[in-house]
Structures are given as C-alpha cells and as structure tokens.
Image: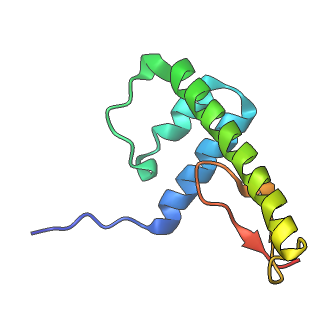
Amino acid sequence: MRCNIFSLSSVHAAVIAINEAIDHGVPEGTMAAMQNPNAMLINLDTNGAQQYHDTLYHAKGEKVANSRKRVCSQQTVCGGSCAGFRWREKNVGLGHIMLQRP
C-alpha cells in the first residue's frame, strides 16, 4: 500500500500564494493559486473564480478585524508586550496568526 505524503512546507507555501493572490484582487490569480496541487483543494469550479475570490477576501477581512480586537484585548491585559511577543498583522490570512519577538 502506498501512502500519499505531502510536505507541510509545500502546503504552507500554497496558502501563502493564495493569500497573496487575494491581496492582489484578481479573481483569476486567486483561482490559479487555488489550483496549485499543493493547496490540496479538489473539485474547484473554474467558473466560480469571482465567487471564490470574493468569499475568501471577505473571510480574510473578518480574520484581520478579529485579530485587531485580540490585539486590543491583549494590550489591555499584558500592557502590549504579551510576554515578549507582538502581533504581526501582515501574516493574517487563511493561515495562522504568527507571533514574533520585537
């Protein structure tokens, strides 16, 4: 029996490419990024590029807004330092929110 092995870094790179395509605002670019086999998305409707793009754009906007709310509450709770970490808003997208040392 053969197993399908995928590289987590390849999946992460595909998610980054999708996020960048969303930021560029071109539905066809978003669709092209989604069609990357490393994104592991199946049964995509190529006629739905605009709808996919719009849905992902709005979802990403909501995630950014929610992360900003978290930043405000974290700054209130821990004085903004959050144990030596700060939020990086530019990394908010379909992937996870990253923290980095200041």
Within the image, what quadrant is residue 57 found in? top right
- In the image, is residue 70 above or below residue 101? above
Q: Does 93 sit left or right of 50 as displayed? A: right
- Give the image location of residue 83, x and y in percent: 80, 83
Q: Specify the color scheme.
A: rainbow
Residue 51 vs residue 87, the one in the foreground = 87
Q: How far from the left and from the top, in percent, is residue 76?
A: 86, 66
Point 46% across, 19% down: residue: 48
Q: Quadrant of residue 82?
A: bottom right
In-front residue for pair 58/82: 82
| 53 or 68, nearer to the observer | 68
User: Number of marks in the image?
Assistant: 0
State whether residue 6 is above or below residue 56.
Answer: below
Q: Is residue 66 left or right of residue 40?
A: right
Depth order, front residue of 25/4: 25
| Above or below, comparing residue 46 to residue 94 in the picture | above
On-image quarter of the C terminus = bottom right
